[in-house]
Amino acid sequence: MFLSLFADIIASPPVIQQTPAAILIKSGQVALLHCYHGDNSYPYMLWYQSAAGGRHTMDLIGLLHYETQTPEKSFENRFNMTGHSKGKAQMIISDTKPEDTAEYFCAAR
């Protein structure tokens, strides 16, 4: 299974930093993705998944508002968003599955 992130995406004005740039894990393991922007003007952090297979769509996984997560129904069982929306946040994917192979993005709003 291969998960990748676009690192250092520039959205005006906050600079979004995502790590790791790529991660390779086995099914059933935990994936930990980090996002940081450090701009107090943006109280929401959103996480998106762009699945492999040529769909060319981005699905909203959920959002953090300060320290409160609001996941979308289809992601709420295994995707957990922690941290703070105005700074450092993490997304944890538990019990990873082959269908989690995707690119993941965070955004500040």
Image (cartoon, grey):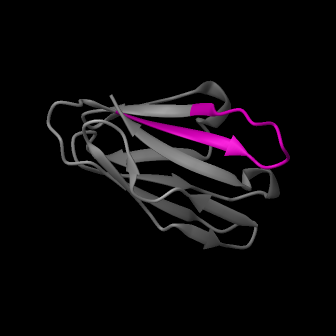
Q: How many marks on residues? A: 0
User: Does residue 48 belong to the magenta stretch?
Assistant: yes
From the viewer's perspective, is 10 left or right of 72? left
Image coords of residue 17 (percent x, y): 35, 56
For the N terminus, which image quadrant?
bottom right
Position of residue 76 measured from the top left corner of the image (x, y, whole percent): 58, 35
Using the image, determine if residue 3 lies above or below residue 88: below
Residue beneath the point at 67% across and 42% down: 50
Q: Name the quadrant containing residue 57.
A: top right
Residue 60 percent coordinates (x, y):
57, 30
60 lies left or right of 54: left
Q: Is residue 83 above or below residue 3?
A: above
Look at the image and say whether residue 46 sits in the magenta stretch.
yes
- Identify the magenta region: 45-60
Q: Of 16 and 84, which appears nearest the observer? A: 16
Relative vertical location of residue 64 with respect to residue 22 in this rendering, above or below: above
Residue at the spot 29% in from the left edge and 48% down from the top edge: 15
* Foreground residue among 89 and 69: 89
- Residue 90's spot in the image, x, y percent? 40, 53
Q: Nearer the viewer, residue 88 or 108?
A: 108
Q: Is residue 92 placed above or below 21 in the rendered structure?
A: above
Farthest-out residue, left: 40
Q: Residue at x 56, y 38 (%)?
A: 48
**Picture quarter with the C terminus:** top left
Residue at 69%, 59% (x, y): give it. Answer: 96
Which residue is situated farthest in the right direction here? 53
